Amino acid sequence: MHVFLETERLTLRRFTEADLDNLVALDADPEVMRYLTGGVPTPPEVIATRTLPRMLDYHRRFDNHGYWAAIDTSSGQFLGWFELRPGDDGRTDELELGYRLRRAAWGRGYATEGSRALLRRAFTELDAQRVYAQTMTVNVRSRRVMEKAGLTLVRTFHRDWPDPIDGAEHGEVEYALHRADWLRRDPQPGSAG
Ligand SMILES: CC(C)(COP(=O)(O)OP(=O)(O)OC[C@H]1O[C@@H](n2cnc3c(N)ncnc32)[C@H](O)[C@@H]1OP(=O)(O)O)[C@@H](O)C(=O)NCCC(=O)NCCS
């Protein structure tokens, strides 16, 4: 097992081919997919031919950027995933944070715990100057995680979706945190994420 980082309760490790069923089950839950596809599960063949290969490709190309499986360290259970990766422009001083967890794991602070640890990694060991996250305006749970992790609202914007899902009319939000602000707020080197 290739561990990327550990928090009090979570182990973030690299994905492997054996994670196919974990990802299929995660994306099969309409509640998990509500603000991503309007609740439509991702077809298993899409996960097998696109989602998982893309995640594995990140591991081949980068040591510190990509997607990691989140495991409950005490039970060994797959909880979902976190991402920390360059945006479409490929800049590594600006990283996008994201997360997707199984519904059974919601509301226990896991997303906040993992996000804080990734921010610490980004600002102390990687060359990130800014970490940002985007979600639908109506995805209150996700926005709350961003706020608890220390990101602040930067902008609301609208995309032209070919087939907009419920709530898309309210647009998307972007939250961000700069390294200087993170250092000011969270200055103890080595303290737990
Ligand atoms: C977004 C997600 C990762 C949050 O995971 P989580 O582990 O439940 O998050 P946390 O427990 O750390 O925090 C959730 C916060 O939202 C709050 N919250 C939960 N439901 C809420 C609701 N309906 N309205 C307002 N706040 C809500 C919780 O109370 C908690 O805040 P608190 O600690 O101040 O009480 C999870 O819901 C998920 O995977 N959703 C599906 C995928 C997704 O939407 N990902 C983001 C797309 S960009």
Image (cartoon, rainbow, N blue to C red):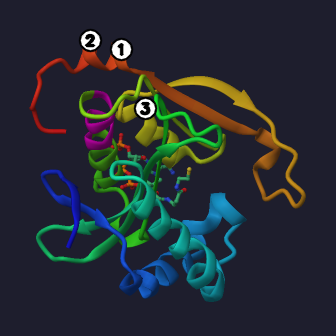
Query: Tag 3 or tag 1, which sits nearer the N-term?
Result: 3
Quarter where residue 192 is shown: top left
Identify the residue at horizontal 17%, vertical 51% (top origin).
7
Q: Residues within 10 Å of mark 2 (few under 14, many from 20)?
A: few
Quarter where residue 147 is shown: top left
Inspect the image, locate mark 2, and give the three-letter code of the amino acid beneath it: Arg
Q: Residues within 10 Å of mark 3 (few under 14, many from 20)?
A: some
Q: Which residue is mark 3?
A: 147
Quarter where residue 144 is shown: top left
Q: Is residue 120 one of those drawn in magenta?
A: yes
Q: Is residue 72 above or below residue 16?
A: above
In 3D space, how far apart are the residues under numbered discs 2 and 3 (Cα atoms)? 16 Å
Q: Bounds of the magenta span?
A: 117-123
Kindly state the secondary structure of the residue where label 3 is placed: helix
x, y percent for residue 11: 20, 61
Which is nearer the eye, 178 or 36?
A: 178
Name the side, left or right, on which 112 lies relative to 95: left
Q: Which residue is mark 1?
A: 181
Q: Is residue 40 above or below residue 67?
A: below
Kindly state the secondary structure of the residue where label 2 is placed: helix
Q: Quadrant of the N terminus?
A: bottom left
Q: Is residue 47 above or below residue 34?
A: below
Identify the residue at horizontal 58%, vertical 40% (top origin).
90
Inspect the image, locate mark 1, and give the three-letter code of the amino acid beneath it: Asp
Query: Tag 3 or tag 2, which sits nearer the N-term?
Result: 3
Q: Which numbered tag is attached to residue 79?
A: none
Name the side, left or right, on which 33 lies relative to 109: right
Image label count: 3
Identify the residue at horizontal 46%, vertical 28% (top origin).
93
x, y percent for residue 111: 35, 51
Q: Which residue is mark 2?
A: 184
